[in-house]
Every structure is written in structure tokens, then in C-alpha cells.
Image: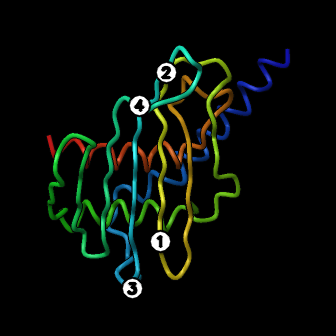
Amino acid sequence: MDYKFAAVIAGIITVMGVLIAFPNLNQQPNTDQVSDFKIEYSKQRLVRSEAGSLAASSAELLTIDNSGLAAYSTGQSPEKQMQLSREEFGRIKGLILETGFMQIPRTDYLQKEGLSEFTKYTLRVTAEGSQKTVNWVDAASYEGTIPPIISNVGLQLDSVIAKFG
């Protein structure tokens, strides 16, 4: 019975997140007034050694500045840069600034105990004189539901990373 209740609550939270994010994905947000916007997004594949410590088997870093210039690097490759289109940059900026992302109260969504490998994400956003850092793991490695707004921002930033090929 408790499992069904938790599933219903998780479903309601997911639907609310989609309803909040969906209208903002289809329109060009008016976020041009924000002059100090910066995104730092890192993605690490962590593996537990036989000694029990976690080590990154791969790491990626994406930064996007207020002009929409994206820079991408991994531990093994030099930094690459690309200018995002006005529409794509506006969509990402709007998703962060107009959906309540900066007001998310909880900022750490940590992995379940005993996992031998998982992906960890860190997103640091600077906007309008404030900073927000959110840490989360892939959904299968977390006991609970990661808010859809966090997952949606992560998916948008992963699509930018994919363009660096």
C-alpha cells in the first residue's frame, strides 16, 4: 500500500514538473536582461575500486557563458568551443531562470549505498548575483525521484555535449 502511495506522489510530482517546463520549451524566453549568467556542468562516471574508494573513470565538463559560448573538455582531450544558437541558448537559459530551478530547496541527490558504479552530475549556475549548485546521480542510482526540472536541464546540457561529438 505504501509503495502505491509513493508511486502516485512521484507521478504527481513528475506531471507538475512537465507542466511547468513544457510551455517554456516551446517559446523564446525573455531572459536577455540577465547579464551575469554562467553554467558549469560536469558529468563523472564513478567506479568503486576493490579498496572501496570511488574514482572517476571518465569526466566531462561543459561551461556556457552569458553570450552562449560553450566550452567542452574531458580529462583526455583539449577544450573545444562552439557558439550555441540564440534559440538553443535561450531555451536553456529560460529552463533555468523561468521554471523555479534556482529556487529548488534541496541540492544533493546522492547515490544508494553499495553501488559499484554510477554517473554523478554537478550543475553550478550563476545568475543575477546568486549561485545555485545541484548534485545528482543517474535515476537508477538514486532511492527516490529526482525532480524533473533537474533531469530536464541535464538532458538539455547533454544534448549540447553531444554536438561536440
Q: Nearer the viewer, mark 1 or mark 4?
A: 4
Q: Alpha-carbon distance for marks 1 and 4?
A: 25 Å
Q: Alpha-carbon distance for marks 4 and 3?
A: 36 Å
Where residue 17 appears, x then y in whole percent? 57, 47
Q: Residue drawn 53% across and 17% down?
A: 116
- Relative to 29, does residue 151 appear above or below in the rendering? above
In the rendering, which numbered label is found on residue 117?
2
Where residue 59 appears, x then y in whole percent? 35, 39
Q: Earlier in the sequence, mark 1 or mark 4?
A: 4
Q: Alpha-carbon distance for marks 3 and 2?
A: 41 Å
| Residue position marked by numbered label 4 in the rendering | 45
Q: Secondary structure at mark 4?
A: strand
Amino acid type indicated by mark 2 = Glu
| Residue position marked by numbered label 1 in the rendering | 126
Specify how the rendered protein is coloured.
rainbow
Q: Earlier in the sequence, mark 3 or mark 1?
A: 3
Q: Nearer the viewer, mark 3 or mark 1?
A: 1
Please name whichever residue, 146 or 120, is drawn nearer the observer in this view of the structure: 120
Q: Earlier in the sequence, mark 1 or mark 2?
A: 2
Q: Alpha-carbon distance for marks 1 and 2?
A: 30 Å
Q: Are dots 3 and 2 in contact, CB under 8 Å? A: no
Q: Earlier in the sequence, mark 4 or mark 3?
A: 3
Please name whichever residue, 165 or 16, is drawn nearer the observer in this view of the structure: 165
Q: On the rendered structure, is 101 left or right of 22?
A: right
